[in-house]
Image (cartoon, helix red, strand yellow):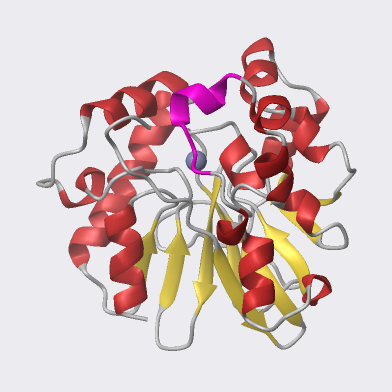
Amino acid sequence: MPGVPLVCHVLLIETNSGLVLVDSGFGSHDCHDPAQRIGVFRHVIRPMLHHVETAAHQVKELGFDIADVRHIVLTHFDLDHIGGLADFPDAQIHVTAAEAFGAVHSPSLRERIRYRCGQWAHGPNLVEHTPDGEPWRGFAAAKPLQTVDEGIVLVSMPGHTRGHAAVAVDAGHRWVLHAGDAFYHLGTLDGYSRVPLALRAQDALISYDRSQLRANQARLSELYRRGDPDLLIVCAHDPGVYEHARATA
Ligand SMILES: [Zn+2]
């Protein structure tokens, strides 16, 4: 985005049954053909599409094989989160049923414009979940993804999109809560850092349900300010949040 540097934060998790990604960022197909894959949005968000930054490239750099990635858990279906799916054709793709409904099965006109169906033209193996289990730290609906790993929980956090979710990962000494695009900038949670105007505008303009978004941001902010030592909250796009997560890993 012009004037506001953003990252596309993808989590890689090593489990007993293979590798798991949370989101997939932009992928190699987006780098090859941004006009077809991303369309006019590329002029708005202006992504730096470098192969070396794709999840697939970085997984291989770490010495793994693409096929070692067995599962990808998505926060939502926006183009900057699912572009890498085609690089992992054998992985199971986990998403909320509400998100799959609004993006793939029965999108409204607005959702049809928002999502880029070419990014899933390869026919990913979707596994849909309805988070209706125990509450998770104040969020009413969550579901442990036991078929993926015991320590991975899909936490329903709608608002940015119809079926947006956060993904909580038990990292042993703490939980990492990847909140996707439930917030863009730490200022939304800490209450004193200034959120750039462009991000505030985007937050308001493209959210599917603004009141759900605000309610979930209020709960995230409450959790952040409480400062539980066993919880790290990250989002997809704030470079400062990303650097802090790396530094305290
Ligand atoms: Zn995003």
Residue 46 colored in magenta in the image: yes
Q: Residue furthest left?
A: 192
Vertical order, 123 against 114 (above or below): below
Locate residue 236 relative to residue 247 in the image: left or right.
right
Locate residue 34 relative to residue 170 in the image: left or right.
right
Q: Where is residue 189 shown, x and y percent of the image?
A: 24, 49
- Quadrant position of the N terminus in the picture: top left
Picture quadrant where residue 23 is located: bottom right
Q: Residue at x 33, y 55 (%)?
A: 239
Locate residue 198 relative to residue 205 in the image: left or right.
left
Vertical order, 104 against 60 (above or below): above
Picture quadrant where residue 22 is located: bottom right
Vertical order, 19 against 197 (above or below): below
**Is there any visible trace of residue 141 in the rendered image?**
yes
Number of labelled discs? 0
Q: Where is residue 133 shown, x and y percent of the image?
A: 63, 59
Q: Residue at x 14, y 46 (%)?
A: 191
**Magenta span covers which residues?**
40-48
Q: Residue at x 28, y 26 (%)?
A: 198
Q: Where is residue 240 shown, x and y percent of the image?
A: 27, 58
